[in-house]
Image (tube, coloured by chain):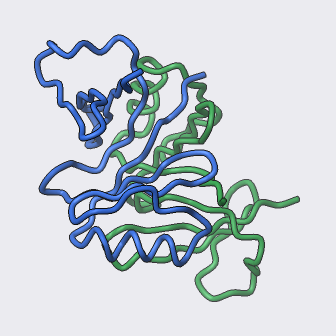
Chain colours: A green, B blue
Amino acid sequence: MEKIDHIAIAVLNVRQAANWYAKNFDCKIKYKDKTYAVLEFDNIELAIVSPAEHPPHIAIVDENLDENQIGIMKHKDDSLGIYEHDGAGNFVEKIKYKK
Amino acid sequence: MEKIDHIAIAVLNVRQAANWYAKNFDCKIKYKDKTYAVLEFDNIELAIVSPAEHPPHIAIVDENLDENQIGIMKHKDDSLGIYEHDGAGNFVEKIKYKK
């Protein structure tokens, strides 16, 4: 079975929301800046994103991504990502981490 | 660290969206009806819900829930749930499964 790599929720104030989750749940802030934060939970990462940069989405690893594909993005950590739409209102990101 | 029990995305046609995920990813349909479906991934469950019944949310287990609490819901499987708002536009459900 496939793993969901992370889920991303969109908020207007990333730092404030990241702090809310860290205060209310037993999780760890792995990264936090003004437009993007990553919270580590036991089984998954929760990304908190600015809607100006990313839509809310769920992300699943896809080792077949190719950096020359149309629509591909390179993230800050050099991972590759591409959005698909589930046809029902939700974005799914396929993501490939750098080895 | 805490585990995220499930994430729920809202769609207009639950059966169609559940089939889309099952076709596109290696996951298992654990339950499916007209307003609610559960897909099992390796590390987490993805719930697909009708927005008329549930908001999109992420759910975290909370063993301290009490069925007499104001706002508590009882799910079909007898688990208890209550929504909180993260103050940034997203709902978080606290959930307690029946032992």
The quadrant of the image that shows the C terminus of chain B is top left
* Spot occupied by residue B66 in the image (x, y as percentages of width and height): 24, 12
Q: Residue at x 43, y 68 (%)?
A: A91
Instruction: Residue B27: name its quadrant.
Output: bottom right
Judge from the rendering whether residue B12 lies leftward or rightward of residue A84; answer left or right: left
Compared with residue A45, is residue B72 higher up or lower down, i.e. above or below? above
Left or right: A5 as drawn, with respect to A55 = right
Residue B8 appears left or right of B52 = right
Task: Please report the residue visible at 70 percent of the width from the left and 70 percent of the height from the top.
Answer: A62
Q: Is residue A76 above or below residue B16?
A: above
Residue B72 in the figure: left or right of residue A87: left
Does B73 appear above or below A79?
above
> Residue B22: x percent and y percent?
50, 71
Residue shown at 39% from the left, 60% from the top: A52
Look at 18% across and 57% down and name the residue there: B51
**Residue B1, position in %: x, y?**
60, 22
Residue A95: x percent and y percent? Answer: 66, 65
Tell which of A40 and A15 is nearer to you. Answer: A40
- Residue situated in front as seen by the camera: B50 or B40: B40
